[in-house]
Image (cartoon, rainbow, N blue to C red):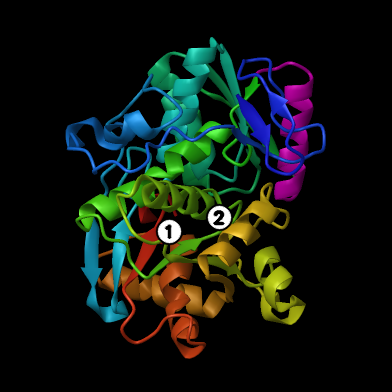
Amino acid sequence: MYRCWSCGRGYSETAGAPWRCECGHALDFADSSAPADTAPPELDRDRGLWAFEDVLPVSRGVTLGEGWTPLVDAPEWDAQFKLDYLFPTGSFKDRGAATTVSQALELGVDRLVEDSSGNAGHAIATYAARAGLDATVYAPADAKPAKLQAIERTGADLVRVEGDREAVTAACHEAVAAGEGWYASHAWQPAFFAGTATIAMEIAAQREWSVPDVVVTPVGHGTLLLGAYRGFRALQAAGWTDAVPRLVGVQAAGTAPLVAARQGEAAAAGGNEAADGIQITEPARREQLLAAIEQSGGDAVAVDQSATEEVSDRLDRAGVSVEPTCATGPAALPELRERGLVGPDDDVVVALTGSGLKA
C-alpha cells in the first residue's frame, strides 16, 4: 500500500498505480516493515544489501551483489568516508535500482522508463538488463559521454533531450503518460528509497550498531539523504541504535534550493558547473528533505566550483577517485566546522557517491 506524505491518500501497490498523488506529492510505502524492540540480527553480508531484506518493504528479485561498501578512515578530513562509488555501476544509485527493479518484477512490469542526468539511468538500465526487462532512459543531450555510453551498452533505449534537467523530466513524464512504460524514477518511486535506506543500516552495522554524530551527503533530488534518514529512523525504532545522526545535505552553489529555503537566496548563490550530478532546481521530495534535515538537527550548505575542484584533486591524490559532484561532501566540511554544525569532537561520515571513472 502506498500513502501520500502530504495529504494522506492511499493507493494500491500495483503496476497501474500512479507514480504521484493526485495532490502532486510523492508517495511512500504506508507501513514500515522494521520490527520494534528486537536485537540486531546476524547478517549474511554475502547477500549484499539484501542482508536487510527482512526489514525492507521489497523482496529480492534482482541483484548484482550490491552493498556493504567500505567505511574507511579519512584522517586528512577528520572523518570517515563511506565509499558508495564502489558499486557495480559506479554509484550509490545501485541501492535504489536493485529494490526498484525488484519491485517491477513483483508487479509484472515489462518496460521501465526513467529520467536521469546519468548515474540513476545507468543503474536502472543495468538492473533492468540483469532482470531481463526493457528500459528507456531520458537523459540530457549534454550529459557526460561516459554515462550516456554506459546506458546504451546495457541495451536500453536512450533518448537524448536538449535543454536543462527539467526539460528531460518533462519529456519523460510525457512518455509515461502516453503509456510507454512503468516510471522507475529514482526521485518518485517509493522502492528506490527503500534501497537507499540501506546505507544507514550498513553504516550502523559496520560501526557495531553505533551511529555517527553527523552524516554528510550530496543532494540533488536527495535520494540518499532521505533514504539515510529513514534508515536511521528505522534502526532507532527497532532499538538497534539509540540516535539519528544530524544529516547535512550539500548542494551546488547556484542550484541549491534547500539552502535557499533554510538560509535565504544569498547563501545559495554562486555557481558550480563541476557538480553537474546535483543540478536539480526542484527536488521531487523537497518538503520531505527539509523535514528530514530539520528533524535530525542538520542543515544544508552550498559549495562553489573552486572548492569542489580543489577537493576533487585532493581526493585523487589521496587515492579516492570520485566524480567531481561527490567532492562537494568533503568540500563542505570546513564551512560546517566554522559554523559549528560539526564540532571538534564530532564523529562524521561523508558519503562518496559516484566513481571518477565516469567523470
- Which is nearer the eye, 150 or 77? 77
Please determine whether, in this image, residue 133 is positioned above or below residue 311: above
Quarter of the C terminus within the rendering = bottom left
- Residue at image mark 1: 323
Main secondary structure of the magenta stretch:
helix
- Give the amino acid at mark 1: Glu
Q: Which portion, as a residue range, is magenta?
A: 163-181
Query: Do the residues under discs 1 and 2 have CB atoms within 8 angstroms?
Result: yes
Number of numbered labels in the structure image? 2
- Say which mark, if any, is on residue 119: none
Which residue reaches farthest right?
Answer: 23
Name the residue at the bottom extreme.
338
Residue depicted at 53% across the width and 51% down the height: 226
Residue 338, relative to residue 211: is it above or below? below
Nearer the N terminus, badge 1 or badge 2? Answer: 2
Identify the mark at residue 277; answer none if there is no mark.
2
Image height check: is 253 above or below 222? Answer: below
Query: x and y percent of residue 298 in the render?
Result: 52, 70
Q: Position of residue 314 (x, y in %)?
A: 34, 76
